[in-house]
Image: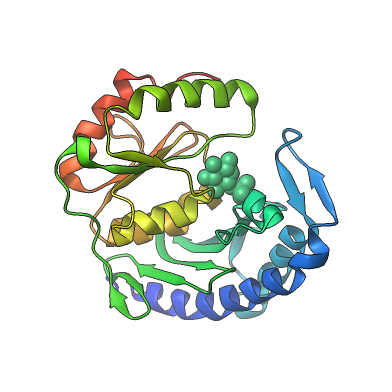
Amino acid sequence: MSEFPAADELLSIAVPIAREAAATARRMRAEAITDVSTKSTLTDVVTEADRAVERQVVEALRAARPADGVLGEEYGESSSGAVRWILDPIDGTVNYLYGIPAYAVSLAAEADGMVVAGVVINAATGDEWTATRGGGARRAGRRLRCSSRTDLSQVLLGTGFGYDAKRRAHQGAVVAQLITRVRDIRRIGAASLDLCSVGEGVLDAYFEKGLNPWDHAAGGLVATEAGAIVRGLDGAPPSLDMVVAAPPAIFGPLQDLLVELDAAGGA
Ligand code: LIP
């Protein structure tokens, strides 16, 4: 039970909507990947399924809670209300395009500027993570706990790269130095799934520069409610500048290393 009364009710609205959205993404994939266009760069792709799933979710949210606001990756902000839904219709669109089974519907509810409920569904596998603020994080009914690792050199670290080549050059240079200081690096390709993996201890920690709210809102709550710290650098909230998710024992040393390597720098 969440300390935010509305959170459980908001989650009970979000889960069936996200499940329908995941089903649509799965059903459409075959034809959607033939209708691909690009956004910020030639590698930043969007398919007809990203758009169709977002329209479907917004319509369902409107029907369930007409007064709420919605911020979606493809159509942006539409209307505002005490509650704002934050949606990534298909997080991991490049994976979706290539058929790599790691792409997700990510839907979070924010009340008074704070994310209070979230669901992430891997549309390829059906895996589903949920969380409410103060109510914990779960997968398949099991309460989640993040990693208990304490030694940074033993950390399995997730990260990601932007769509801009200059930014990737900087991110690649950071990873080249990081890789000798941790156990190994994983690049799953969907921030929402990376963050849920931290929540489950499947990854010990994760960081990425350049994430939008829809990439980390729901997954960030799952990781937080599983005991991880999810923040930017130097006490900042998670933002475009940086998102770091790690267990309390690891967060400090990892943050110091990311600052030392100027991970938030570059383009
Ligand atoms: C993706 C993120 C991923 C990042 C990619 C991209 P998208 O979101 O989930 O972590 O590395 O560059 O931003 O574009 O698939 O919704």
254 above or below 266? below
> Which residue is depicted at the point 58% across and 34% down?
162
Q: Is residue 193 above or below residue 172?
A: below
The residue at the point 29 percent across, 73 percent down is 2
Picture quarter containing residue 27? bottom right
Asked if residue 41 shows in the view, the reply is yes
Number of numbered callouts drawn:
0
Colouring method of the image = rainbow
x and y percentages locating residue 15 in the rendered image: 51, 77
Q: Is residue 130 left or right of residue 108?
A: left
User: Which image quadrant is residue 145 in?
Assistant: bottom left
Q: Image height check: is 244 above or below 28?
A: above
Q: Nearer the viewer, residue 162 or 214?
A: 162
> At x 39% / y 59%, what residue is drawn?
196
Residue at the spot 43% in from the left edge and 79% down from the top edge: 9
**Coordinates of residue 187 in the picture (x, y in percent):** 47, 44
